[in-house]
Amino acid sequence: MVEDLDPASADAGVPAHFGDPMREQRLLETGVGLVDRSNREVIAVPGEERASWLHTLTTQHLATLGAYQGSELLVLSPNGHIEQHAHVTEDGTTAWLDTEPGAGAGLLKYLEMMRFFTRVEPRDATAELAVLSLVGPGAAGLFPDLAAPQVGAVPGPRFTAGSVPARATSLYAVREFEGGLARRVPLGVDLLVPRSRKDAVIEQLGVQRAGLWAYEAVRVAHRIPRLGWETDHRTIPAEVELMAPGVHLDKGCYRGQETVARVHNLGRPPRRQVLLHLDGVATDHPPARGAAVELDGRAVGFVGTAVRHHELGMVALAVLKRNVPDDARLTVGESAAAIDVE
């Protein structure tokens, strides 16, 4: 049985599950499953100056990004707030940026505004390429030629001074695949395939299917934030887990860099992303995105993504004020919540 997501959902258009979301989660945690994420929007950036141009506009070091390499990038406001997050995949002639459903138009508008006389031709390519994800430890075995992702650590409260690199970077291996591209990422392998061949590629791979509910549960358990879910209009990169994969700390100027540098050097961003364990939540009624997290009746943050995990139970990624203690007993609606400090 295939169940699609509610048409009103931001993720409408892809399967929610195939009859057993808990089994599908276990598959993604222990083996490999194929998740249709073709609701992601894709921007193509061809042009001989694309690498240096994207380098100047975003948080990532892209000036030397070569053919068959990938990374992640952020576009920030002048005040350093996250406006866009995308994966970038380079094939030697075009940089392909895939981003969240509904975010493509804003990203393309910004790129078009910043073209000036640069030799680039950004366009909406969502109708051209679809994103499929092979998730789980078994994904690497299907693409043994793709090296594991290189994601740098960012010095901060979790680390001892001098024990980690002084800069952050991410580099994902890429190769051609069935008229598109395969990209090794932390959760497995993403495939950018011609949308007209999506169903044929799924059948050809023969990998067991899993729905987006299972993918989201795995993402939350791995504390991977999502634009528009774990971010709001004032989120800065240091507040969520996007510094290591998306921000290079040793590159030239870009919009919002002052905020990134100040918070990185002085520490203590105003908020932080946490994993909450929720108690007393009905299985079919997890907290809504944006629900207030309260401490002693006072709002101290918001819920991003709430899911029922096959091992952890009901959990949620949330963004809280920095001064909320790790042992605080929080509430989300009528439910109690405890911070996972692992």
Image (cartoon, helix red, strand yellow):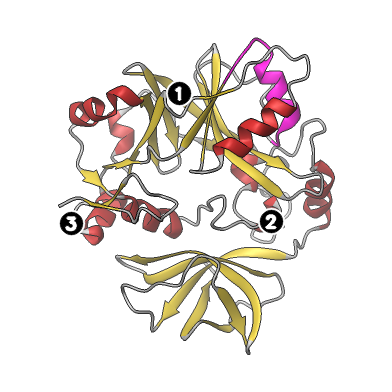
1 or 3: mark nearer the eye: 3
Residue 288 shown left or right of residue 321 in the figure: left
**Are dots 1 and 3 in contact, CB under 8 Å?**
no
Mark closer to the chain start, 3 or 2: 3
Q: At x 44% / y 77%, what residue is drawn?
A: 278
| Residue 166 % position (x, y) | 73, 42
Query: From this viewpoint, which residue is outermost toward the bottom?
Result: 296
* Mark 2–mark 1 distance (CA, rounded to whole Å): 32 Å
| Position of 189 relative to 241 (above/below) | above
* Secondary structure category for the residue under label 2: loop
* Mark 3–mark 2 distance (CA, rounded to whole Å): 36 Å
Q: Which residue is mark 3?
A: 19
**Which amino acid type corresponds to the residue marked 2 in the rendered image?**
His
Mark closer to the chain start, 2 or 1: 1
Please indicate, yes or no, whether residue 172 appears anywhere in the rendered image.
Answer: yes
Q: At x 53% / y 51%, what residue is drawn?
A: 226
Tell me where residue 88 sits by quadrant: top right
Mark closer to the chain start, 1 or 3: 3
2 or 1: mark nearer the eye: 2
Q: Is residue 130 magenta?
A: no
Q: Which residue is mark 2?
A: 233
Q: Which residue is mark 1?
A: 174
Point out the stretch of residues depicted in magenta. Answer: 45-59
**Are dots 3 and 2 in contact, CB under 8 Å?**
no
Q: Which mark is residue 300?
A: none
**Which amino acid type corresponds to the residue marked 3 in the rendered image?**
Gly
